[in-house]
Amino acid sequence: MRYKLVLGILVLSLVTSLGVNAYFYTLILSHQAQMNNFLSQTIATWAREMYIAGYLLQNAATNIEVAGVDSLFESAQMTAETAWVYDSQTVYLHMALTAGDVEENLFAYCVGSPTDLKYINQTAIEMSAILYAKIQNLTHLFDIWELDHPKGNDPIHLLQGSIDSIINNCTDVRDYSAEINNFAPKFQ
């Protein structure tokens, strides 16, 4: 009788322990799925911000227009930094550095904005169009629809086949934006 009572208590303890563990495991999986969804949507937002900023940059002909575009690259940098803070994957760091470097390299074309209108040198405008093409190459590596409609999967797994290409294209965009920054004269 005593053994049955002890055995019953042990079985009850085991069942309770398994139930509690299953509950917390479910909570952890739910939290991880939410975090993965957040990261996926953050990556999609960054890709859209970069694409739009590049599109607007290719048509910018004055320092005032570039200043407006420059702030979009700054926004893209902050978006990527958000992902990097939550998950320190290297690709998120490259995304943040790319947007930040483009923003920093375009700053020289914002001189005098918004009160002193200056027209940008035609060659620099043509270089901006090339930069936009490089940004397009980068942003097309992301499946925006898949990232916008996450299913709790780790976005790094969604990007797995193209991470090296993403990093290489980020470097290409950063390097070319540095060339635009080094170009002189910047204004007509």
Image: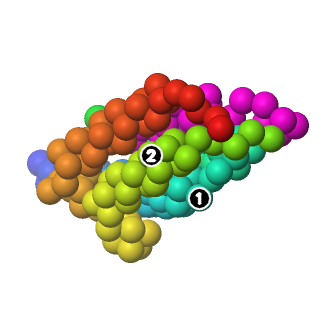
Q: CA distance from mark 1 to mark 2?
A: 11 Å
Q: Is residue 7 left or right of residue 70?
A: left
Residue 118 visible at all: yes
Q: Residue at x 59, y 41 (%)?
A: 121
In this rendering, the count of numbered labels is 2
Q: Is residue 37 above or below residue 90?
A: below
Q: Is residue 57 left or right of residue 134?
A: right
Residue 16 visible at all: no
Which quadrant is the C terminus positioned in? top right
Magenta residues, dominant SS class:
helix
From the image, tell me which residue sits under label 1. Answer: 59
Residue 27, quarter of the rendered image: bottom left
Comparing 153 with 109, the one in front is 109
Residue 155, quarter of the rendered image: bottom left
Q: Residue at x 46, y 35 (%)?
A: 180
On residue 4, which mark appears? none
Q: Give the colouring mode of the picture.
A: rainbow
User: What amino acid type should be assigned to the residue bearing mark 1?
Assistant: Asn
x and y percent of residue 57 in the render? 56, 52
Badge 2 crowding class, 10 Å Cα cut-off, few under 14, some 14 to 19, many 20 or more, is some
Badge 1 crowding class, 10 Å Cα cut-off, few under 14, some 14 to 19, many 20 or more, is some
Task: Give the structural element (helix, strand or loop) at label 1.
Answer: loop
Q: Is residue 64 left or right of residue 178?
A: right
Q: Which portion, as a residue range, is magenta?
A: 91-116
Q: Is residue 3 above or below residue 112?
A: below
x and y percent of residue 123 in the render? 49, 44
From the image, tell me which residue sits under label 2. Answer: 127
